[in-house]
Image (cartoon, rainbow, N blue to C red):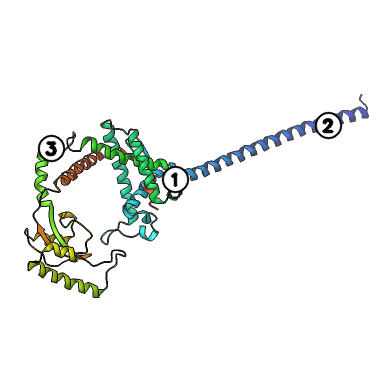
Amino acid sequence: MANKKEITKKTTKGATTSKKASSKRTNKKGKILIAKNIIIGISILVVILISILFLVFRDKDEVLITIDNIKYTETDFNMYAYLIKYEYFGIDGTNLSEDALNTQVSSDSELTVRDYLKERVISKIKVSSAILRIANENNITLNDEDLEEIKEEKEEFINNLGGKSEYKKMLKENNTNDDAYMEVAKVNKLYDIIYNSLYKEGKRNDLTDDEVEEFTKTYQSDYVKIKQIVLLKKDLDTNKYLDEIVLNQKEILANSLVEMAKSGTDFDELIEKYSEDSKEDKEEYYLKSSLVENLKNAINKLDVGDISGVISTDSAYHIVIKEKLDNKKLADYLESKREEKFVQDIADNLDKIAVVKSGYLEEITIK
């Protein structure tokens, strides 16, 4: 029979062993808990980092539209948007205010400047894709000389902006990059190369003999040749209207010049002495479609040799004598018809390109 002392020793030993086992279990659970907390913390950190990276790079990498398997990102969109604003408004008009962007394009349309520019950007991207398709179908690529010209044109563009620092500033402010600029520049160069390779006189897609004959006839109806005396209504430096007294004086002078011309005074001498137009060549050739409406209508009523009355337009008073049209501008006119033919072929290719728009294209806006 065990004595009390032995029982006490066994009990104490068992209790000690039990405490050690319990401590080990507790430590093990604690380590597992700590490990789980570390894993959870790391996971949260990864999610945060991914979110930050997404926000940082989404503006540049988000694909907005895919055309013929070519992906156009927001970076590309922003470059097209900038260049279109540059083309329309010049360097000073590329940073349009919110009020300007929200202005309606016209009084009879709800389309804002912002919406219109976005439409132009998407259209320009599609046209670029059509140009690339035509180039690919005809095995037309850029050579080293073409790339050198692009480089020179880029330098000129950068100089117009004010130098490399201003160029970098422009890229940053518009959330775009140099690669996007170069892609647009290459497409523009391809346009010229395709035209010169396929559509210029004597090339495969030149005007046919029938087209040349047809356009030679329409040249006679589309063009007009005149001489004119111009008395300006606006200051050339400020583009502001002259004061009312000066305008009245000019209108009186214009009526006097009409009387002088119709009474036999040499028209060229009157142009030399009174006309405020800066053109050195007294003979002027115009596409009728380029003339303001009231000037075009007045000229259409004249026979060759007739002198008009005073024709008032927004910018000037005009006195016109209609001349017999010669063929001096016919070559230029036919060249314009060749380019129209090329543009029509681009438009026809727009129906062939495969366009896939992303949902984000609806959200993007001109800034």
Residue 51 vs residue 287, the one in the foreground: 287
Q: Amino acid at mark 3?
A: Thr
Q: Residues within 10 Å of mark 3 (few under 14, many from 20)?
A: few
User: Upstream in the sequence, badge 1 or badge 2?
Assistant: 2
**Mark 1 vs mark 2, CA separation in Å:** 65 Å
The single residue placed furthest to the bottom in the displayed view is 245
Which residue carries the number 2 mark? 16
Q: Position of residue 172 (x, y in %)?
A: 45, 48
Label 2: element kind: helix
Closer mark to the observer between disc 2 and disc 3 = 3
Vertical placement of 300 versus 34: above or below?
below
Q: Residues within 10 Å of mark 2 (few under 14, many from 20)?
A: few
Q: Amino acid at mark 2?
A: Thr
> Can residue 65 be seen from the camera position used here?
no
User: Upstream in the sequence, badge 2 or badge 3?
Assistant: 2
Q: Residues within 10 Å of mark 1 (few under 14, many from 20)?
A: some
Which residue carries the number 1 mark? 59
Which residue carries the number 3 mark? 208
Q: Amino acid at mark 1?
A: Asp
Q: Position of residue 201 (x, y in %)?
A: 17, 38
Closer mark to the observer between disc 1 and disc 3 = 3
**Mark 1 vs mark 3, CA separation in Å:** 48 Å
The residue located at (27%, 37%) in the rendering is 193
**Mark 2 vs mark 3, CA separation in Å:** 109 Å
User: Upstream in the sequence, badge 1 or badge 3?
Assistant: 1
> Can residue 345 be seen from the camera position used here?
yes
Label 3: element kind: loop
Vertical placement of 140 versus 82: above or below?
above
Label 1: element kind: helix
Q: Position of residue 19 (x, y in %)?
A: 80, 33
